[in-house]
Image: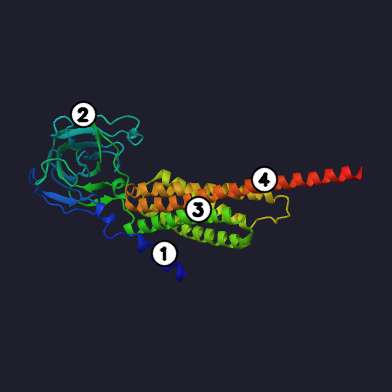
Amino acid sequence: MRRFDALLMLVVVVVLPSGGAAAAGAPGRCTTSTPVKAYAKCIALPTQGATLAWTYDARNATLDAAFTGSFISPSGWVAWGVNQDAPAMAGARVIAAFSDPSTGALLALPFVLSADVKLQAKPLVSRPLDIPLLASSASLVAPARTVRDGATVTIAATIRLAPNRTRVHFVWNRGLYVQGYSPTIHPTDASDLASHATVDILTTATESSPIASPRLQWAHGSLNALSWGLLLPVGAALARYLRPCASAGPAWFYGHAAVQATGYALGAAGFALGIAMGAASPGVTYKLHRGLGIAAATAGSLQTLAVFFRPKTTNRYRKYWKSYHHLVGYGCVVIGVVNVFQGFEVMGLGASYWKLGYCMALATLVGGCVALEVNAWVVFCRRQHEEKLMRREVEDVVVKDRAAAF
């Protein structure tokens, strides 16, 4: 157990960057004084360094608010709004700020995020909100004069709320691109998916979805990339290309079993961390990544259990067991590698050196397998040719002996 803990810490230390993901979702520092006006209360929102300041007039149930966030791209967008039903994107009414594609001026357009927004079936089109929006605007915070990566923007809005309703569901996010006047989908990091909160505008009490710690996320990603993404493919390659070598003897089997057992143990630990992260972040769901992870873990478990039911070489069912073992094994490897790439996207590392390093390692393995596969076929064809020549020689000898007998 101590060796496993030491290995886990070693893997985390090797791949964990200093700083890193925590900064992307770190809360900002709020202030009641904004470039627009001064407000009565403010809070630091839990993700993206965003803040919210507001003044609530209980006499007419009017909320005068200013959201402050930052762009992540010169062609990006920042949006903030409210959801009357739940702290979620679907069903929210938002104001999105981005540059006018024609003039470059900063726009603040209203959007209704219907339930089919996640499906991206059609472009998001601006339309008037069906809530009492009395005023809205957007302005860049000095020293920024144009939209750029890191530029801060303030979105101000005045909304009339339902009487005696002081708990408001706020949502906010930011994206990389705007197509025409239609914001495209935002990144899917854990902090982006958790960019919503319920705020009591009288007491500033805030309820938000918890997010798994960055260290836990990196431990999960590191273990899974090492196990499902590298060790299991290496173990499969050992069985594929060492077994035909007579000089290797039974070493191929022990090497294959050792690598696969290590890979499965680390993969099971990474899978367990994923379950723990899901339990710690109830508002964050990655359906495809989760589904592929469950499929890979199931296939790996079936492979492990199949070892205990392996028939002897003389058993007539041995060939069916081998077919099952190969099918499930290769399927597990493919699903695991695909899910590692999906994991890079989930963690926002789709264009990172971490993904590049993994791609280089995987490409090296694949290149080696291709070379060994070509060599295996060359050896196979050569043996077939030699056996064919030997059969012909034997047939010729038999014919000659029969002729001599007559």
Quarter of the image with the C terminus in it: top right
Give the alpha-carbon distance from disc 1 to disc 3, as whole Å: 20 Å
- Tell me if residue 52 comes above or below residue 22 in the rendering: above
Residue 237 percent across, percent down from the top left: 54, 53
Residue pointed to by mark 4: 385
Q: Position of residue 143 (x, y in %)?
A: 9, 47
Question: In 3D space, how far apart are the residues under numbered discs 2 and 3 (Cα atoms)?
Answer: 53 Å
Q: What residue sits right under mark 1 in the picture?
A: 8
Distance between mark 4 and mark 3 Cα atoms: 32 Å
Q: Nearer the viewer, mark 4 or mark 1?
A: 4
N-terminal label among 2 and 1? 1
Q: Residue at x 66, y 49 (%)?
A: 383
Residue count near mark 2 (Cα–Cα under 10 Å), binned few <14, some 14–19, many ≥20: few
Q: Which residue is mark 2?
A: 128
The residue that label 3 is drawn on is: 233
What is the count of numbered marks? 4
Q: Nearer the viewer, mark 2 or mark 3?
A: 3
Q: Earlier in the sequence, mark 4 or mark 3?
A: 3
Q: Amino acid at mark 2?
A: Pro
Q: Determine the secondary structure under disc 2.
A: loop
Q: Earlier in the sequence, mark 1 or mark 3?
A: 1
